[in-house]
């Protein structure tokens, strides 16, 4: 399974998503992003916006932002 999480160190929403992935036993890679929104070009290219967290599930062709949506996806699909 190829799952990537774009996250910012110290971001509480990113930590919730990371915790949910850990609790579900999902193997994933974390891509740490810059604190400045203006420097998050890769996040914008992938998701169309600069906010984090962003989850990418290559196996299912899913890219999503918004922690609540990601948490729901992890519980329903990846757990």
Image (cartoon, rainbow, N blue to C red):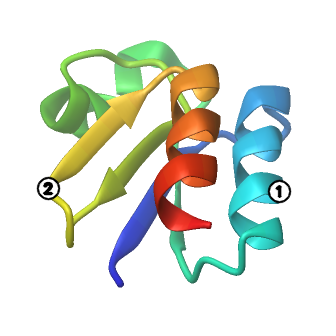
Residue 57 against residue 43 in the figure, above or below: below
Secondary structure type for disc 2: loop
Pick whichever, 78 or 15, lies toward us. Answer: 78
Q: Is residue 20 left or right of residue 67?
A: right
Q: Is residue 52 left or right of residue 65?
A: right
Secondary structure type for disc 1: helix
Question: In the rendered image, which residue does mark 2 sit on?
Answer: 61
Pick whichever, 64 or 42, lies toward us. Answer: 64
Pick whichever, 23 or 66, lies toward us. Answer: 23
Mark found first going from the N terminus, 1 or 2: 1
Question: In the rendered image, which residue does mark 1 sit on?
Answer: 19
Q: Residues within 10 Å of mark 1 (few under 14, many from 20)?
A: few
Could you say where residue 30 lies in the image, as x and y percent from the top left?
55, 65
Q: Residues within 10 Å of mark 2 (few under 14, many from 20)?
A: few
Could you say where residue 64 lies in the image, as x and y percent from the top left?
35, 33
Could you say where residue 33 lies in the image, as x and y percent from the top left?
52, 43
Q: Is residue 40 left or right of residue 26?
A: left
Please tell me which residue is depicted at 64% across the width and 38% down the height of the picture: 71
């Amino acid at each position: 399974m190829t799952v990537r999480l774009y996250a910012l160190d110290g971001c509480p929403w990113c930590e919730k998503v990371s915790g949910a992935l850990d609790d579900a036993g999902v193997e994933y890679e974390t891509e740490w992003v810059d604190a400045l929104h203006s420097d998050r070009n890769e996040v914008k290219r992938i998701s169309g916006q600069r906010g984090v967290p962003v989850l990418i599930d290559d196996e299912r062709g899913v890219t999503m932002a918004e922690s609540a949506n990601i948490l729901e996806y992890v519980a329903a699909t990846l757990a």
